[in-house]
Image: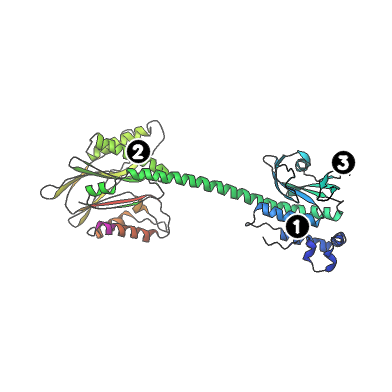
């Protein structure tokens, strides 16, 4: 805020006749001058975002109270919801002065002025009135003005002004005329302070939530296959894993049982925290079904997974429709001729393979895991293909193909398949970089809509 006031508003004018405050009542009789003085004062105390409420109020009193020849003042802010007044700042108050920090409507003169929305004037007698100690003497207060600050019929606060002598009527009129302008600026400051306080609360809560989610990410990362284990299962591979948020509803899973390697890529309902909860359930169930119960047929794995998801989410008795789409394949060890038997089952997700210079798609079944409300539970089916050492397989969630650009056009499954086929002979890390770049070129500045996972493995 730019402040041009010193002690008196009269200093704003170059006429030497107005340098003496005694001349103010006479000059205020001139309406043009009076209007100009009010307008200039309003301009000086204008509200600005970068000025704190207490600083603005201190500047207000420091300029206003000497102008009307007051000696002390206090300013309270109103809280209409609580019917309460809170001390904001004062003028010429000693540190020893006892100031009530809060007052209820109707309490003391300040509370009465707030309750009635009417100014209160008190003129104490010399022998029984308010006495202020100075360094050399005691001086009686001749008048106390308690003025509610009202703007647009809204109570913003209450200002109390103490005078050593009877104030000039022009001073009181000046305070009255200035009252709504003080109120409107005070309201703006109050709303700004409330907004800042609310934003600070939201920022703090956001930090706490973000911190918790980041910690949850550490837990989720721990359930994903470690690099060493994945490299042991597949020496040549890539994993393009791009959560939309900090935690993900997508996850990938690998396990070696007997002479078989199982690979799954899973897309749980939702993303972020909700999706991450589902991913924890799905990961746990896959471990139980394959590693503990040794159910090794992909179609049976999906049947059991579907049944257990429905039990875990009580979907027979609730309206919960959460679940997951996934593809899982069982990859056998190469035989003596380098042939590899791959058995695949998918819940709405396909398996892409490149074999003998051709991209082959093994479609998944049209059902998701969980959320089925038909009479009979769906039955998933195996798809079998014989591949060779050096062939490539890809499993993806729908996040990549569904990624939209600025015109809301999806990347598309057909374009994805063309990319996979065009680069399948390149190194797996080259393929990962190219897929990532192609996705960025498509999305440009468009926000990611879903979790994205693409896993490629060279057999």
Instruction: Find disc 2 in the rendering and name its residue.
Output: 281
Instruction: Find disc 3 in the rendering and name its residue.
Output: 128
Q: Position of residue 329 (x, y in %)?
A: 24, 44
Q: Position of residue 323 (x, y in %)?
A: 36, 40
Horizontal side of 325 relative to 391 (left or right) equals right
Pick the front one: 63 or 420: 63
Frontmost of labels 1 and 2 is 1
> Reading the chain from its start, which is encountered first: label 3 or label 1?
1
Residue occupying the point 79% across, 41% down: 109
Rate crowding at label 3 as few (under 14), some (14 to 19) or many (20 or more) other CA atoms within 10 Å: few
> Reading the chain from its start, which is encountered first: label 3 or label 2?
3
Horizontal side of 52 relative to 392 (left or right) equals right
Q: Is residue 379 visible?
A: no
Q: Which type of secondary structure does the marked residue at label 1 adopt?
A: helix
Magenta stretch containing residue 248, yes or no?
A: no
Using the rendered view, name the quadrant where residue 7 is placed. bottom right
> Reading the chain from its start, which is encountered first: label 1 or label 2?
1
Residue occupying the point 35% across, 32% down: 311
Q: Which type of secondary structure does the marked residue at label 2 adopt?
A: helix
Which residues are the magenta region?
425-431
Farthest residue, direction left: 336
Residue 167 against residue 314 in the figure, above or below: below
Pick the front one: 160 or 394: 160
Q: Position of residue 51 (x, y in %)?
A: 64, 56
Cα–Cα span, label 1 and label 2:
67 Å
Instruction: Find disc 1 in the rendering and name its residue.
Output: 63
Q: Position of residue 110 (x, y in %)?
A: 76, 43
Cα–Cα span, label 3 and label 2:
80 Å
Cα–Cα span, label 3 and label 1:
30 Å
Farthest residue, direction top: 317
Residue occupying the point 70% across, 53% down: 57
């Amino acid at each position: 805020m730019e402040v041009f006031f010193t002690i008196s508003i009269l200093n704003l004018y170059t006429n030497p006749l107005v340098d003496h405050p005694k001349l103010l009542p006479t000059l205020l009789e001139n309406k043009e001058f009076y209007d100009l003085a009010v307008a200039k004062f309003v301009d000086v105390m204008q509200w600005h975002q970068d000025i704190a409420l207490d600083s603005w109020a201190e500047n207000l009193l420091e300029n206003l109270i000497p102008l009307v020849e007051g000696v002390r003042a206090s300013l309270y802010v109103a809280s209409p919801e609580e019917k309460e007044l809170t001390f904001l700042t004062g003028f010429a108050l000693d540190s020893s002065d006892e100031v009530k920090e809060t007052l209820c409507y109707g309490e003391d003169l300040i509370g009465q002025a707030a309750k009635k929305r009417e100014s209160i004037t008190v003129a104490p007698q010399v022998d029984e009135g308010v006495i202020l100690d100075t360094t050399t003497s005691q001086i009686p207060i001749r008048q106390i003005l308690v003025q509610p600050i009202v703007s647009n019929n809204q109570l913003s606060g209450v200002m109390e002004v103490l005078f050593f002598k009877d104030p000039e009527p022009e001073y009181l009129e000046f305070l009255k005329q200035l009252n709504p302008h003080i109120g409107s600026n005070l309201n703006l400051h109050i709303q700004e302070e409330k907004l800042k306080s609310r934003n600070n609360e939201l920022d703090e809560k956001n930090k706490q939530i973000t911190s918790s989610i980041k910690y949850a990410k550490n837990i989720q990362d721990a359930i994903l296959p470690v690099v060493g284990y994945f490299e042991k299962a597949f020496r040549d591979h890539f994993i393009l894993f791009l959560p939309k948020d900090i935690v993900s509803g997508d996850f990938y899973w690998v396990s070696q049982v007997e002479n078989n390697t199982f690979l799954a890529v899973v897309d749980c309902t939702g993303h972020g925290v909700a999706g991450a909860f589902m991913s924890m359930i799905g990961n746990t169930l896959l471990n139980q079904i394959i590693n503990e119960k040794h159910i090794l047929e992909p179609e049976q794995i999906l049947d059991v997974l579907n049944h257990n998801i429905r039990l875990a989410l009580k979907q027979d008795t609730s309206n919960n429709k959460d679940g997951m789409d996934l593809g899982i394949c069982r990859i056998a060890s190469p035989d003596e001729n380098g042939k590899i038997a791959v058995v695949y089952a998918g819940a709405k997700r396909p398996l892409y393979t490149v074999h003998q210079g051709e991209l082959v798609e093994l479609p998944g079944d049209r059902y998701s895991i969980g959320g089925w409300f038909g009479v009979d539970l769906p039955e998933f089916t195996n798809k079998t293909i014989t591949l060779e050492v050096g062939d490539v397989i890809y499993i993806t969630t729908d996040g990549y193909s569904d990624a939209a650009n600025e015109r809301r056009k999806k990347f598309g499954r057909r374009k994805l398949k063309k990319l996979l086929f065009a680069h399948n002979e390149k190194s797996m890390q080259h393929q990962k970089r190219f897929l990532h770049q192609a996705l960025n070129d498509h999305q440009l500045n468009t926000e990611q809509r879903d979790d994205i996972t693409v896993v490629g493995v060279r057999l």
